[in-house]
Image (cartoon, rainbow, N blue to C red):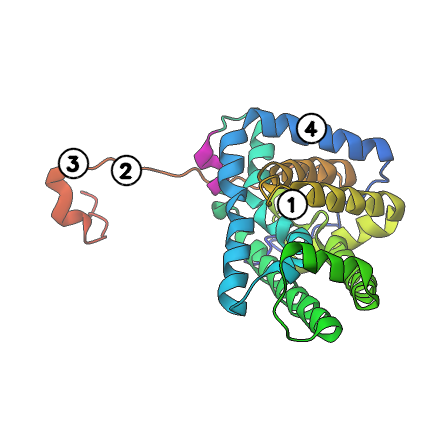
Amino acid sequence: MATIYPVDSAGVTTRAAEPMVHRLAFADLHDALRRGWEDFKAVPSHAIMLCVIYPVLGLALARLVLGYSVLPLLFPLAAGFALIGPFAALGLYELSRRREAGEDISAWHAFDVMRSPSFGAMLGLGAILLAVFVVWIATAQAIYVSAFGYAPAAAIPDFLARVLTTPEGWMLIVVGCGVGLLFAIAALCVSVVSFPMMLDRQAGIAEAIATSLRVTARNLLQIAAWGLIVAALLVLGSLPAFLGLAVVIPLLGHASWHLYRRAVERNQAPPQIRPSRRIRRSAADFPATLLQWKPRRER
């Protein structure tokens, strides 16, 4: 969806100035996590509904596509959620925005993000992150095959012994973590504030990514620390059969909204998301409801 710019008094469309980015302190990261946790406690039920499905679908998809045990790809899958997490948290940004503005919050409000003026741009950037995620999984699979061949993965104890006690396993850890770090850095730089900015402003993909890169360039140490926090929380959330991600991903989604608030100047004229309208109809209207037309107004 195209970005909408203001129009001056002469009727000429003018491009809005780039938003100012602020310098972050490490205390801002802690504050973002604290506020994110408060948001999660205020609206926990639909946060879990929105996010718990992603690890389940990821494992099921990998099982169907690969056709054998996903044991070698458990860690890459868990790490890969950091790549698509910013897109998966779209509804959480909307919940945090509404709570910040003092508006009513319910489970259905998470889906109001689909009526955002820049939802099309969000889908576009989400598709890019999904493509990066797929490339990462394919790369991780190629690294594993280069180390251990095409033999099916053994049981968990044997698999861990091969990875942790053999030269091939050490090579797998070093190369896999190194390549994964590059994917994570790229995704973090382009999406650290992109999606919240699209929701808060009528921003397109290029404008949002450019702002995210400027935030990263001005706060290299702080954004690096944020990336480490995200990675550590995802690892902790993945340990109990990925169930912890149902809490970790909502927490990070809400916290990302508040990090955006700290990193980018506030939008003085945020776009208005039109409320959903539910039209009540009676049973007598059933035939007519199948045909969508507008009645003529009487003159």
Mark 1 near mark 2, Cβ–Cβ under 8 Å?
no
Mark 4 near mark 2, Cβ–Cβ under 8 Å?
no
Amino acid, disc 4? Arg
**Mark nearer the N terminus (4 vs 2):** 4
Q: Is mark 1 on a helix, strand or loop?
A: helix
Looking at the rendered image, the quarter that the N terminus falls into is bottom right
Q: Is mark 3 on a helix, strand or loop?
A: loop
Numbered mark located on residue 279 in the image: 2
Q: Residues within 10 Å of mark 4 (few under 14, many from 20)?
A: many
Give the CA separation, mark 3 to mark 1: 48 Å
Q: Name the residue under label 3.
A: 282
Depicted 76 relative to depicted 244: above or below: below
Q: Name the residue under label 4.
A: 35
Numbered mark located on residue 85 in the image: none
Amino acid, disc 2? Ile
Give the CA separation, mark 1 to mark 2: 43 Å
Q: Where does the magenta region start and end?
A: 106-111
- Point out the frontmost of discs 3 and 1: 1
- Point out the frontmost of discs 1 and 2: 1
Give the x, y percent position of residue 215: 80, 48
Q: Is mark 4 on a helix, strand or loop?
A: helix
Examine the image and state in which quarter residue 256 appears.
top right
- State left or right for residue 111 relative to residue 145: left
Q: Considering the whole magenta stretch, tell me its main secondary structure.
A: helix
Depicted 284 relative to depicted 176: above or below: above
Q: Mark 1 points at which residue?
A: 238
Looking at the rendered image, the quarter that the C terminus falls into is top left
Q: Is mark 2 on a helix, strand or loop?
A: loop
**Mark nearer the N terminus (4 vs 1):** 4
- Residue located 75% across and 51% down the image: 212
